[in-house]
């Protein structure tokens, strides 16, 4: 596989995690921003952290295939090969623009111009080994087309790219449990293709990233599927669905930030709307899981007032005890932070330079997270659910904790463990 100077070269330092029952990696959708996830994974690999489970949506699903489809020692190099194969270097005009603009304006404006040019190229030319403009387009009224051809781009090349960089026998028979989310076009339901329940093929991963109307629906067993991000862009609930009675560490890697600046022009409005649209469900899911843990703790406290004989004899109380003995969930949240030159086109700006910047940001953020070893302690069952985020402002309380504070359930939640 090709070598590259993309790797951030520093000495690998050992990082020893507590004995969690499960370590999970959750990868959100976000198109070209997905190289940030590859950088995070490189940092995990350098620290010797190997996930037991990976759940992905859209570009997160493609990264999932590359990680799970390779031996541990080859995963970072395979990710690098995948991203370098689908990303264009800037052409001569883009480079000329980037070089010339500082002569007339600010360096940031130069970088923004080059980024816009690269995004424009992706729209008009597609990306090698990923998607290509569909010609002719299936214009409405001319003829009826099948769902897998009604799109602006053809993604047929992606199948061979996935097969080139991922071993699907290893995905299905290897040690990592894999799930990728997609939406059934006919029913509108979100489904997860899980290698614990079925054999996964390239089409399952392509379906997870089939965002309409750009990309076509993918047919699997007579049904058509679109990008899972249409319903939920963050597959955290899928990973934690069966997490009861487990100590679980989750590295949740998001590509869209819920918080941001108030827009000042129409381009800023378009970018901010995307951020909110694709990140809002992350906040909702995190709040829901925190509430579930809080309710489990309330049940446990109430059961302490029930006589032991009644708890043993009544099946309802035994069921309540089972619910109350919930899980300990620790979420290390890594969220890509926008660069000043990026705009609403950032998810389809596939230039090689920008890809490397995203990748480096991921490496830096996971290393900064590992600089807080106390974050990785297993939460007590009383705490239940804790979150950490390297970009969270000092003193800021996560939204997932505000419900606990307002409900008066304090006293058992150590907020210092949740504030960066």
Image: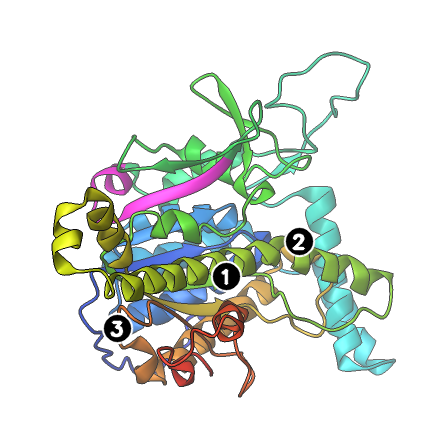
Identify the residue under disc 1.
287
Q: Nearer the viewer, mark 1 or mark 2?
A: 1
Q: Residue at x 56, y 45 (%)?
A: 229
Q: Secondary structure at mark 2?
A: helix
Q: Secondary structure at mark 1?
A: helix
In this picture, residue 265 sits left or right of residue 276? right
Q: Residue at x 33, y 64 (%)?
A: 297
Q: Nearer the viewer, mark 3 or mark 1?
A: 1
User: Residue 90: percent from the left, percent from the top?
Assistant: 66, 60
Assess whether mark 1 and mark 3 are in contact (beta carbons under 8 angstroms).
Answer: no
Circle 2 residues within 10 Å: few <14, some 14–19, many ≥20: some
Considering depth in this image, is 100 or 384 the residue closer to the camera? 384
In this picture, residue 52 sits left or right of residue 201? left
- Return the disc, 1 or 2, that comes first in the chain's sequence: 2
Identify the residue under disc 3.
378
Highlighted range, magenta: 169-182
Identify the residue under disc 2.
277
């Amino acid at each position: 596989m090709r070598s590259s100077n993309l790797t951030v070269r520093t000495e690998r330092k050992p990082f020893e995690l507590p004995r969690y029952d499960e370590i999970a990696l959750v990868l959100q959708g976000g198109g070209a921003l997905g190289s940030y996830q590859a950088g995070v994974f490189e940092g995990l690999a350098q620290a010797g952290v190997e996930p037991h489970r990976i759940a992905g949506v859209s570009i997160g699903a493609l990264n999932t295939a590359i990680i799970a489809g390779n031996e541990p020692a080859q995963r970072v190099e395979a990710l690098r090969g995948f991203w370098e194969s689908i990303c264009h270097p800037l052409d001569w005009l883009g480079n000329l623009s980037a070089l010339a603009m500082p002569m007339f304006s600010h360096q940031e404006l130069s970088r923004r111009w080059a980024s816009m040019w690269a995004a424009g190229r992706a729209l008009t030319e597609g990306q090698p080994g990923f998607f290509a403009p569909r010609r002719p387009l299936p214009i409405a009224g001319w003829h009826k087309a099948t769902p897998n051809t009604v799109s602006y781009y053809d993604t047929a090349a992606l199948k061979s790219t996935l097969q080139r960089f991922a071993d699907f026998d290893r995905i299905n028979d290897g040690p990592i449990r894999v799930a990728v989310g997609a939406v059934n076009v006919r029913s509108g339901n979100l489904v997860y293709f899980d290698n614990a329940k079925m054999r996964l093929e390239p089409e399952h991963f392509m379906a997870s990233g089939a965002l309409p109307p750009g990309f076509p629906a993918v047919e699997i067993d007579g049904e058509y599927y679109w990008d899972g991000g249409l319903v939920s862009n963050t597959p955290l609930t899928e990973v934690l669905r069966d997490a009861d009675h487990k100590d679980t560490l989750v590295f949740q890697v998001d590509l869209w930030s819920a918080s941001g600046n108030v827009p000042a022009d129409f381009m800023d409005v378009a970018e901010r709307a995307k951020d909110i649209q694709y990140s809002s469900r992350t906040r909702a899911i995190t709040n829901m899981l925190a509430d579930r843990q809080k309710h489990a703790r309330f049940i446990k406290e109430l059961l302490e007032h029930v006589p032991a004989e009644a708890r043993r004899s009544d099946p309802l109380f035994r069921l309540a005890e089972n619910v109350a003995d919930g899980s300990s969930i620790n979420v290390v949240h890594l969220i890509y932070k926008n660069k000043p030159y990026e705009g609403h086109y950032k998810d389809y700006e596939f230039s090689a330079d920008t890809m490397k910047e995203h990748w480096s940001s991921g490496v830096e953020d996971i290393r900064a997270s590992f600089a807080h070893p106390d974050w990785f302690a297993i939460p007590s069952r009383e705490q239940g659910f804790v979150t950490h985020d390297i970009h969270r402002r000092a003193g800021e309380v996560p939204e997932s904790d505000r419900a606990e504070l307002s409900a008066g359930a304090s006293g058992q939640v150590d907020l210092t463990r949740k504030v960066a």
